[in-house]
Amino acid sequence: MDRFFDRANGALALRHDARLLHSKSRPEAWETWSTCNGVALPVRPWQMLEHVYLILQAAAAGLGVAMGWWHMARDEIASGVLAAPIGFVADGSRYLLLSSEAASPRVIRSREALLDWMHRFG
């Protein structure tokens, strides 16, 4: 982590030369994080990959710092493969469940089962 973070006044901060890993599936993630935390992001090296999963894998390989969703990173964090040294910040993003079918009993049961599963597993 010392390659990417400095400890200033007891708090971790991104180093000015830390490579930020961006995903095409959520290219605004670093800017959103910066706004939510009131932290300016100076110009620094960065790399764009196709999906959040790929930037998490690149971070695990030591190629830079990734900004990802907790639910996609939690197993790697729990196992020690990844770390969240600055933590997670709610940014207002949400998931939507859409169906091409009207709200038939089958669709309603499926929706409720999915929501139940999501609540159980975070």
Image (cartoon, rainbow, N blue to C red):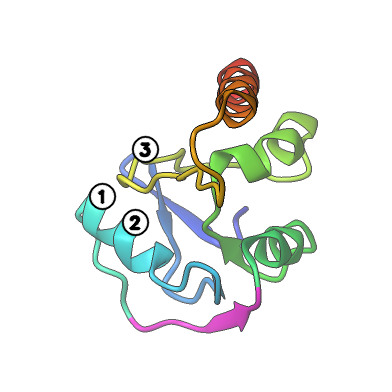
Tag 2 residue: 33
Q: Mark 3 to mark 2: distance in Å?
A: 21 Å
CB within 8 Å, label 1 to label 2: yes
Three-letter amino acid code at the position of disc 3: Gly
Is residue 18 positioned above or below 84 on the image? below
Residue drawn 41% across and 63% down?
29
- Neighbourhood count class around disc 2 (C-alpha, 10 Å): few under 14, some 14–19, many 20 upward: some
At mark 2, the secondary structure is helix
Residue range of the region highlighted in magenta in the rendering: 43-50
Tag 3 residue: 10
CB within 8 Å, label 3 to label 2: no
Mark nearer the viewer, 3 or 2: 2
Does label 1 or label 3 sit earlier along the sequence? Answer: 3
Does label 3 or label 2 sit earlier along the sequence? Answer: 3
Tag 1 residue: 37
Is residue 32 positioned above or below 70 on the image? below
Q: Mark 1 to mark 3: distance in Å?
A: 17 Å
Q: Mark 1 to mark 2: distance in Å?
A: 6 Å
Residue drawn 68% across and 58% down?
56
Corner quadrant of residue 24: bottom right
Mark nearer the viewer, 1 or 3: 1
Corner quadrant of residue 89: top left
> Does residue 121 belong to the magenta stretch?
no
Task: Please name whichever residue, 95 or 110, is drawn nearer the observer in this view of the structure.
Answer: 110
